[in-house]
Amino acid sequence: MRGKTTEDWRLLELLDPIAEAQGLAIVRLRLMGAAPVRRLQIMAERPGGSMPIEDCTRLSRAVLDVLETANPIGGDYSLEVSSPGIDRPLTRLEDFETFAGCEARLELDRLADNRRRFKGRLTGVDGRSVGVLMDGEDQPARVPFDWISEAKLVITDELLKRGAEARAARLKSSPAGETEDHPEETLP
């Protein structure tokens, strides 16, 4: 799920070490569109989920250096590096554990419990299966992680509150007078 096509996976093999060297993890990579200009979208984050603009800039520059040298795309492309955002894609098994308790939409590449789409509260991971408790159900459905083709958090009041609390905790633990978005800005 971090990559969709063979070309995406080749790029991930090339770029994962670049991100890791900066203390980041690539959450998702997509090379989209066709000539004359394709778009390379990279979502990345620090352990713990933050991705300040400075990290986006640093990763973007490092990725461009590698792409210019290796030329794996061929032709023109635009590069977009960002955080996964609040309604982030869930692409790694650990994401389903981290976001247990949150609402998510999952789409499978085959049927499980006679369905391909699931929407409900994540209940965590058991081995390589993801638990999803759907409305009106007593027990969570167990979905094999390897069958998930797309998964994304659903924006809810609870998710917004969780995001605000995480951001406040990061700001509180940062050096006095700094924010993650604007280091020169002082907090009230």
Image (tube, rainbow, N blue to C red):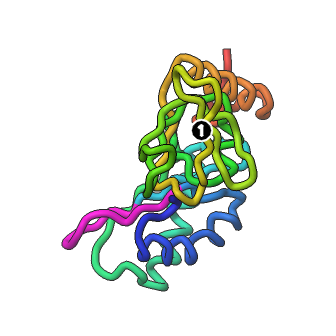
In terms of depth relative to the viewer, which is nearer, 84 or 53? 84
Q: Is residue 99 above or below residue 23?
A: above
Kindly identify the residue that appears in the image at 51 percent across and 53 percent down.
148
Q: Secondary structure at mark 1?
A: strand
Which region is colored magenta? 28-40
Does the magenta run of residues contain 36?
yes
Q: Is residue 4 magenta?
A: no
Which residue lies at the image location 66% right of the left edge and 31% below the top edge? 179
Out of 168 and 130, give the one closest to the viewer: 130
**Main SS of the magenta segment?**
strand
Which residue is depicted at the point 53% across and 20% down? 136
Q: Few, some or many C-alpha atoms within 10 Å of disc 1 (few <14, some 14-19, many ≥20)?
A: some
Q: Residue furthest left?
A: 36
Where is residue 188 shown, x and y percent of the image?
A: 67, 14
Write down the quadrant of residue 170 in the picture.
top right
Instruction: Name the residue carrying label 1.
Output: 141
Above or below 57: residue 19: below
In the rendered image, the residue lying farthest to the top is 188
Q: Position of residue 141 (x, y in %)?
A: 59, 38
Q: Is residue 116 above or below residue 155?
A: below
- The amino acid beneath tag 1 is Ala
Query: Taking 3 as reference, is 131 left or right?
Result: right
Name, please, the residue furthest toward the front.
114
Examine the rendered structure and indicate whether residue 2 appears above or below residue 188: below
The x, y position of residue 108, in whole percent, is 46, 52
Residue at image x 48%, y 64%?
3
Q: Nearer the viewer, residue 125 or 39?
A: 125
